[in-house]
């Protein structure tokens, strides 16, 4: 998990990284805050605790806290906060997937527990969306096809065009006879 803090005092490297992550389409969980705002000052310490909870190496997820004054430097973001603090899940190159206030979680009390529940609920949903599904045939079925004696048109097509190198290595084949030699001997 990648953590970014963007405010007027931080270097421009974090802003460039954030813009890059937006273009790459990474899942971004962001807190927009206003300096001097009472509720923002209560929320920021809880938001920063996310770093200690999610210390894994999942580089497809970004957690950021952004000061309102540097929002003009974020080029590809299509989010305009309704108020401060605002927490959003941004995905698909700058589009909002979910607002924390509209989230389907048990408590929305802006504590570390509610933030973790919110983030984990979206991580699980996204991991199921990206799961590869089997095609017409399962891998077990494909491996069971005997290409020396295929049954039917589909299996012949699979043996002729669809097999991978791994499949052909695992399956022992009979060596081919040289057909030219056999035919020339018969003619003579």
Image (cartoon, rainbow, N blue to C red):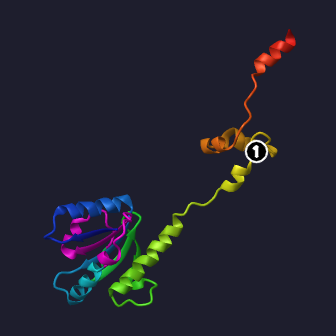
Q: Position of residue 54 (x, y in %)?
A: 35, 74
- Residue 114 is left or right of residue 70, and the answer is right
Q: Which quarter of the rendered picture does the C terminus lie within?
A: top right
- Is residue 61 positioned above or below 109 on the image? above
- Is residue 123 positioned above or below 115 on the image? above
What span is in magenta?
A: 50-79
Instruction: Describe the element under mark 1 as helix, strand or loop.
Output: loop
Residue at the top extreme, as displayed: 188
- Residue 150 is left or right of residue 96, and the answer is right
Residue 64 in magenta?
A: yes
- Is residue 60 positioned above or below 89 on the image? above
Tell me the quarter of the picture where residue 86 sits. bottom left
Q: Position of residue 57 (x, y in %)?
A: 36, 65
Residue sitting at x 70%, y 38%: 160
Q: Is residue 137 visible?
A: no
- Residue 52 is left or right of residue 171, and the answer is left
Residue sitting at x 44%, y 72%: 123
Please name the residue that numbered disc 1 is placed on. Answer: 146
Residue 183 in magenta?
A: no
Tell me the quarter of the picture where residue 32 sits. bottom left
Q: Position of residue 40 (x, y in %)?
A: 23, 85
Q: Position of residue 127 (x, y in %)?
A: 49, 68
Residue sitting at x 43%, y 77%: 120
* Count of picture labels: 1
Q: Which quarter of the rendered picture does the N terminus lie within?
A: bottom left
Tell me the quarter of the picture where residue 22 sits. bottom left
Crowd band around label 1 with a 10 angstrom C-alpha radius: few (<14), some (14–19), many (20+): some
Q: Is residue 61 visible?
A: yes
- Residue 95 is left or right of residue 48, and the answer is right
Residue sitting at x 54%, y 63%: 131
């Amino acid at each position: 998990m990648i953590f970014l803090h963007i405010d007027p005092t931080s270097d421009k490297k974090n802003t460039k990284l954030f813009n890059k992550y937006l273009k790459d389409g990474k899942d971004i969980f962001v807190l927009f805050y206003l300096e001097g705002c009472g509720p923002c000052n209560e929320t920021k310490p809880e938001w920063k605790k996310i770093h200690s909870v999610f210390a894994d190496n999942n580089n497809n997820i970004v957690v950021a806290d952004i000061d309102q004054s540097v929002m003009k430097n974020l080029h590809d973001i299509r989010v305009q906060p309704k108020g401060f603090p605002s927490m959003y899940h941004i995905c698909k190159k700058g589009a909002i997937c979910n607002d924390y206030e509209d989230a389907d979680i048990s408590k929305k009390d802006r504590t570390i527990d509610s933030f973790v529940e919110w983030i984990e609920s979206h991580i699980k949903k996204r991991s199921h969306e990206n799961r590869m599904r089997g095609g017409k045939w399962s891998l077990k079925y494909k491996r069971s096809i005997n290409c020396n004696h295929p049954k039917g048109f589909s299996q012949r097509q699979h043996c002729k065009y669809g097999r991978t190198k791994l499949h052909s290595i695992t399956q022992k084949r009979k060596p081919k006879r040289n057909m030219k030699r056999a035919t020339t001997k018969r003619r003579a």
